[in-house]
Amino acid sequence: MCMKNGKPDDRTRGGRVERLWKFVYPNTTNGIDDPWINPAKDPNLGQVRGSRVQVFVSENDFVRGKGWFYGQKLRESG
């Protein structure tokens, strides 16, 4: 496992996520950018309704970067 600043480096885990997702959803054409696994890539993200949204990101989750990215995209979408 690669470490960066004393913490696991997300880039080395991306391949593991991609392999797992292809196993779980073999018909995907977008890989890990499929909206079912990465909602930040959903072209309809701006249609999420609600005045408040709470996104939880665990410190030790190896896909935590995607959670942060999703939260940022939600903020940007208004």
Image (spheres, rainbow, N blue to C red):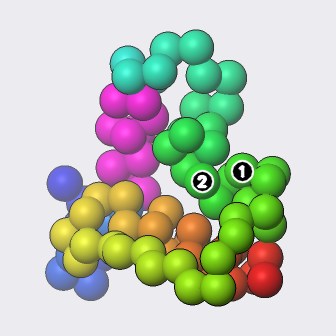
Given contact means CB atoms under 8 Å apart, are the residues at marks 1 and 2 in contact? yes
Q: Can residue 21 be seen in this view?
A: yes
Disc 2, SS? helix
The stretch drawn in magenta includes residue 20? yes
For residue 41, above or below residue 52? above
Q: Mark 1 points at which residue?
A: 42
- Mark 1 to mark 2: distance in Å? 5 Å
The stretch drawn in magenta includes residue 72? no
Looking at the magenta stretch, what is its main secondary structure? helix
Residue 47 in which image quadrant: bottom right
Q: Mark 2 points at which residue?
A: 39
Question: Bounds of the magenta span?
Answer: 11-21
**Where residue 43 sits in the image (x, y, percent)?**
81, 51
Quarter the C terminus occupies: bottom right
Q: Can residue 3 be seen in this view?
A: no
Q: Residue 72 vs residue 78: left or right? A: left
The amino acid type found where label 1 is placed reads Asp
For residue 55, above or below residue 25? below
The amino acid type found where label 2 is placed reads Pro
Residue 75 in which image quadrant: bottom right
* Residue 76: mark: none
**Where residue 37 sits in the image (x, y, percent)?**
50, 43
Q: Nearer the viewer, residue 39 or 22?
A: 39
